[in-house]
Image (cartoon, rainbow, N blue to C red):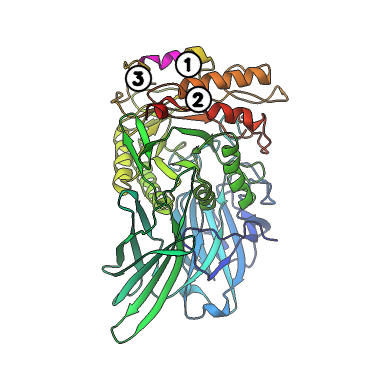
Amino acid sequence: MVKRSEYPRPQFVRENWLNLNGTWEFEIDHGASGEERQLFSADHLDDHIEVPFCPESKLSGVGYTDFMASVWYRRTFEIPEEWAGKRVLLHFGAVDYDCSAWINGIKIGTHQGGSSSFTFEITQALQAGKNVIVVNALDDTRSMLQPLGKQSFDYSSHNCNYTRTTGIWQTVWLEAVPATYMERPRLTPDLDNGSLHIEQRITGPADGLRLEARAFADGKLVATGICWVSGGWGRLTLKIEEIRAWSPQDPFLYDLNLKLVRDTGDEQALLDSAYAYFGLRSVDIRGLAVLLNGEPVFQRLVLDQGFYPDGIWTAPSDDELRLDVERGLAMGFNGARLHQKVFEERYLYWCDCLGYLVWGEYPSWGVDVTLPEATLRYATEWQDIMERDYNHPAIVGWCPFNETIDRRIHYVDMNPHDARSVRLLYEMTKRYDMTRPVVDASGYTHVITDLFDVHDYDQNPATFAERYRPLAEGGEAFVRFPEVSSPYMGQPYWVSEYGGIWWDPAQAAEGWGYGERPTSETEFIERYRGLTEALLNHPAMCAFCYTQLTDVEQEVNGLYTYDRKPKFDPEIIRAINAQPAAIEKKA
């Protein structure tokens, strides 16, 4: 049975698709000479791998964890007969990092970026019967030009740097579309006006086309709209008859049916159709509070790094993606900071379904954005990521950088930034998405930001609380590196990383975490309670993010072990987190 066989793009669904996950031929190309040796036309490769799992993972069947400059994949496939006369698209969920692909020896495209999804049209390269696809991925993790997130820059995994991911790590699939077809729409909820704004891009000849949209609530038709396509775009607004806001308490999703029709006046013909979904919700800022649907909601977030013991960056199953959301909810968190990784679309789908608030973040570690080429790559991929994930109601904020610091100051193990690059990415993010707040560079130094955050791993609840007392009394806010950070200007304020309490129930000598480890479960709970209540009871605090949901390899500061076993009774943590926050009481 092929693993990861579920539909990979749940927000924009067509019926005609073919999953290419499963066993592929595979070869490591340490010298990155494979294209020169024409491996794209080889009749076989020397090894095998289970796609979509990276070769470093156990589930791939390879389990090779040293650096790999280049990897190659090969398999055959046949196009279903009913796809005759249609255009065929080849989709990649993600390939780390520089990808090239060939069909029947014909190069059909290249893509740069290890976290963004991309598509090649392969129609002209196909032949009757058996077809051969070959994929190459180059992965220069030490170039300082490509993002690593928490992938180790060194040979081994250590501290908060973990096993690398190389090559294909998300689903590969084919899709049949007509000559003129719809791409993924851009859906913007407008809760205040009870509306949904639709921007639909059209590819192919677009004369005489109209876009039709229908929205349903629990199967009942609640909105219809029609517009003519102009300049390759259809734009319309649906006025929703029955308003039901999406929230953690009620994660209600509307169904959306989109049709593309050619209307010549004399006749009409359906060209394309697809199904989507959306949630009606708003995210705003008022004073020191972040509002969801007009009401202050204290975001009780947990740091989730999205690593798995057997799949590394790839979950072993769709069920595990859902279960990670449920694990966070069971501990009383209402969301997660998706840390240094762009999560699979299926994970975001479960966040939408279960009402889990998440922040989208770029895996910024490993990139030196003081280099112009790095900034160009960064900005290009970040835009693609936002375009893929824009429609998810669960995403309530964006964060393009993590723990960077102004290049004028040098600290060990900190990523340098150029203030101009940070400002560029912030402004680009805001211009692309005006509906969500943006944290420019989380944790250390800010340039321009909607929310002001800090990272603080003080393990003493008393000194931890004292650090934020002046802000509670109307005084100065704590700024991690005031000599290079922009000053606090009255934005909503939060501690977006704290805790990280080093707790291994077995008390093994190996492992890594923050501070001195507790000597007992009782001591852990009291430390967790003290740190968390200091934030919940703070009148100017809008959110927190505890580090972290699960252990990751040698880092043992999770509330769950790496294999997802709870270290504590979830109800104990849940009861602490569930206490009303001061900022909610003020409302």
Q: Earlier in the sequence, mark 1 or mark 2?
A: 1
Q: How many marks?
A: 3
> Which residue bears the numbered disc 3?
477
Residue situated furthest bottom in the rendering? 266
Q: Disc 3 versus disc 2: distance between alpha carbons?
A: 16 Å
316 lies left or right of 347: right
> Which residue bears the numbered disc 1?
464
Decide whether residue 117 is among the magenta residues.
no
Where is residue 250 drawn, in percent x and y? 48, 46
> Which residue bears the numbered disc 2?
498
At label 1, the amino acid type is Phe
Decide whether residue 466 is among the magenta residues.
yes
- Report if the CB atoms under discs 3 and 2 are less than 8 Å apart: no
Where is residue 230 drawn, in percent x and y? 26, 69
SS type, badge 2? strand
Q: Residue at x 62, y 56 (%)?
A: 4
Q: Quadrant of the C terminus?
A: top left
Where is residue 162 drawn, in percent x and y? 58, 36
Instruction: Give the dominant element type of the magenta stretch: helix, strand or loop.
Output: helix
- Residue 556 seen by the camera: no
